[in-house]
Image (spheres, rainbow, N blue to C red):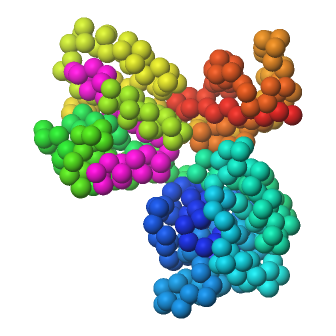
Amino acid sequence: MSTAPTVVIVGRPNVGKSTLFNAIHGQRRSIVGDEPGITRDRIRGECNYSGRPFTLIDTGGIIPNDAELIPREILRQAKTALDDAQEIIFLIDGRSELSSADYDLSKMLRKLGKPVSLVVNKIDAEVRSGLVHEFHSLGFKNVFPISAEHRLGMTDLLDHITREFPVPEEDPEAAPVAEVEPGIRVAIIGRPNVGKSTLLNSLTGQDRAIVSPVAGTTRDSVDETVDIKGVPYTFIDTAGIRRKGKTTEMPEKLSVVMARRNIRMSNVCLVVLDATEGVLGADATIAGYAHEEGRAVVLVVNKWDVASEKQKKMFTEQIRDELKFLDYAPIAHVSALTGRGVKAILTMVRKSYESAAKRVTTGGLNRFIEKINFDENLKIFYITQTGIRPPTFTIFTDKGADLHFSYQRFLINRLRKEFEFYGTPIVIKAKRR
């Protein structure tokens, strides 16, 4: 049982508790949907922020005076979690008016005598931030506007709720413990019939997935974990992703939803392309899903053994031309059928995984900034790393958030070169000092 402090998220149904849980936890543990009441059980996750470990609990939507069996059971489960809580996040919907359930729940939380942070969700634009003061009527001192979906306002919230959590000290007399590799989740994605299932079988050394010349054979996600030099790799073969207009059957639609979910839950995405067909529009769309989710990416050009020499040369040039937004992604040329080139993928996956989780000291970053000759119209005062997977950096400038994309691109390229970020996107956020 974890001895770390416990943070409990509570609120009425459909205010975004599961989305906030996923945003803090860093993985998609809770199911998120528009239908109220999807989460019923307590969902627990172990988290760490700035070296401070804590346990996060997502509760079902609470309606304090509802007599129905399931809402009553949800309330009982939530009260059990609240009894053990060191910090409580009371989440409300910033886009809707306060309801009687919000007032009843605030009254219940105040009686507990525990630290409560009132978190106003769905504040995803400056125009909405002015609405936050209206929620002070609930009687809580600490109010935080956020957008859980867009990860806005998370730093201020986490700084506050973990401010008094202990940082574990190392016991000098404790016996050394062998470091356990956490494991690397690798999603294999691409259009139907580009060889994803064959690649899974080649990577794992066994016929785990059904292979067929018929496009769309895989519908459920197939995963296999293998141990490679002491590191567990979990490879997930996803269904071929089609454009929405091309997807008609319900099982196919669900498989596409699950494929995109597996992208979000992965550490690295293998985007499989067909060397005999060239880069198609659908390839760019699928690769874009991985890029938008901030996943590390390796481009795998399959069927290299049956492509002509002319096709090979043209295809590599086409990749860099058509997929400019993935200029950081390494390219592996393989034949999944024969196994040729497959081992190189593992090296690329490991390097990309490690780069995505790399942290750079603030001192090192600011020494780096001092060496850069920026345009005289832009002054950078300070830079710090604020996240990983993907590596995220916040810079404080005289321009505030209005940082031209050309500056962002220049800074990303220099960061990538200076600190050897490999196979991972980099995010730059700008603020006014």
| Residue at 47% from the left image edge and 61% from the top image edge | 34
Is residue 67 visible to the viewer in this orientation of the structure? yes
| Residue at 83% from the left image edge and 33% from the top image edge | 432
Report if residue 272 lies within the magenta region: yes
Considering depth in this image, is 327 or 363 the residue closer to the camera?
A: 327
Residue 373 percent coordinates (x, y): 79, 12
Residue 85 percent coordinates (x, y): 73, 77
Does 152 sit left or right of 377 as displayed?
left
Quarter holding residue 104: bottom right
Vertical order, 362 against 317 (above or below):
below
Q: Single out the residue that lies furthest toward the left.
A: 213
Q: Single out the residue that lies furthest toward the top.
A: 310
Considering depth in this image, is 169 or 415 the residue closer to the camera?
A: 415
Q: Give the range drawn in magenta.
A: 253-280
Residue 343 percent coordinates (x, y): 37, 33
Is residue 350 visible to the viewer in this orientation of the structure? no
| Residue at 67% from the left image edge and 52% from the top image edge | 123
